[in-house]
Every structure is written in C-alpha cells, then in structure tokens.
Image (spheres, grey):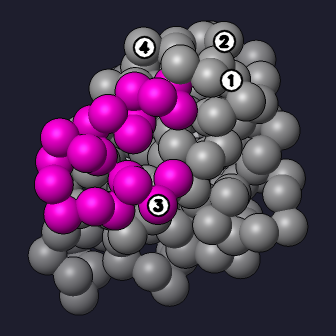
Amino acid sequence: VTALKDADEEVRWHSAKALGGMGPEAVLALGMARKGANEGTLWCIDMTLSELGLEAVPALLHALGDKDEDVRAGAAGSLGVIGLRGKDDVPALITALGDADPDVRTNAALALRSIGPEAKDAVPALIKALSDTDAEVRSSVVWAFYWIGPATEEVIPALLKTLDDEVAQVR
C-alpha cells in the first residue's frame, strides 16, 4: 500500500495491480489509498478496481459502515468507480449521504450518480444533501441529479435554490 504513494508512476501502477491480484480482500486497501492520492495514483487504483468489478462490491458496501472515516470515504469512492449493481445498493449509499465525513458524503453522491436512474429512491436524501455545509458535497449532488434522470416536481425547486449558491461549482 505504501508503494501507491511512490513518486514513480510505474511503481504505483505495479503496486495497484499487485493489490488487485489479491482479489476482493485488497479492495479496502485500494479504496483507502484513493484519499489524498494524486491523479496518476487515482488512475492506477481506479483501473484496478474496475478490473475487479462487481466482485468487490459486497466488501465495499460493508466498508461503508466502518468506524474509520478514511475507510468509509475510500469505499464510497471506489463504489463510484466500479459502478454498482443498481437499486439494491442504494440504501447503503443513502445512509452514507448522512455520514459525518464530507469525503464520504461526496463519494456517496458520486456513487449514486454512477447508478443512474435506478438510484431514484435516493432523491429525498439527495435533496436534503443540497443543503450540506460542504460545497463539494453539494456539487456532487447536483451531478447525481443530472445522471439519475429527469427532474421530478420535488427536485426542480431544490435545484433552483442552488442557483443562489455562493460557490460557482454548485451553481
């Protein structure tokens, strides 16, 4: 895992691939390594996670309940990279939208975005998350709405309020 932070991209790549070769057991280590990683390292980790695919999902969903915020944030981010099985995974991500850590909330919204229209059960929780104190969370929620699909009567007024947000990335 330490090698994922090496200055040499080739070392990072081989480290991520080696962890990926260990199967779902290494998923949490890869997810935790995402936090604070540079763009090249993220790319290596994300490619490895996408190769593991759906076999990694159960471990990541379980990790959303971990006591360590880095584990929760990494798991939520990794779920967004892998792409989820759909509607069955939405309840765990709705819970993660209420997490104390803003990285977890951001990554949960991005994971819901990756589910797309099947994440429509998350709409009430996403509307609530538009009032989050963290701008990155609010911005991720806006993107989640875009990918979840046609705006409903309840979504449109909530999104209109974001036009007055003090942070441009949210507007």
- Mark 2 vs mark 3: give the one in front: 3
Mark carried by residue 55: 2
Circle 3 residues within 10 Å: few <14, some 14–19, many ≥20:
few
Task: Determine which residue is flagged by label 1.
Answer: 24
Nearer to us of marks 3 and 4 is 3
Q: Which of the two labelled residues, at mark 1 and mark 3, occupies the earlier sequence position?
A: 3
- Alpha carbon distance from label 2 to label 3: 24 Å
State yes or no: discs 1 and 4 in contact (Cβ < 8 Å). Answer: no
- The answer to which of marks 2 and 3 sits earlier in the sequence is 3
Q: In terms of secondary structure, where does tag 3 sit?
A: helix
Dominant secondary structure (helix, strand or loop) of the stretch shown in magenta: helix
Which of the two marks, 1 or 3, is nearer to us in this view? 3
Quarter of the image for the C terminus: give it.
bottom left
Residue under pointer 3 = 2
Q: Which residues are magenta?
A: 1-20
Q: Position of residue 21 (x, y in %)?
A: 53, 19
Amino acid under label 4?
Glu
For residue 62, above or below residue 162: above
- Residue carrying label 4: 51
Q: Dot 4 lies on which element?
A: helix
Identify residue type, mark 3.
Answer: Thr
Q: Secondary structure at mark 2?
A: helix
Q: Residues within 10 Å of mark 1 (few under 14, many from 20)?
A: many
Between 108 and 10, the one nearer to me in the picture: 10
| Tags 1 and 2 touching, CB below 8 Å | yes
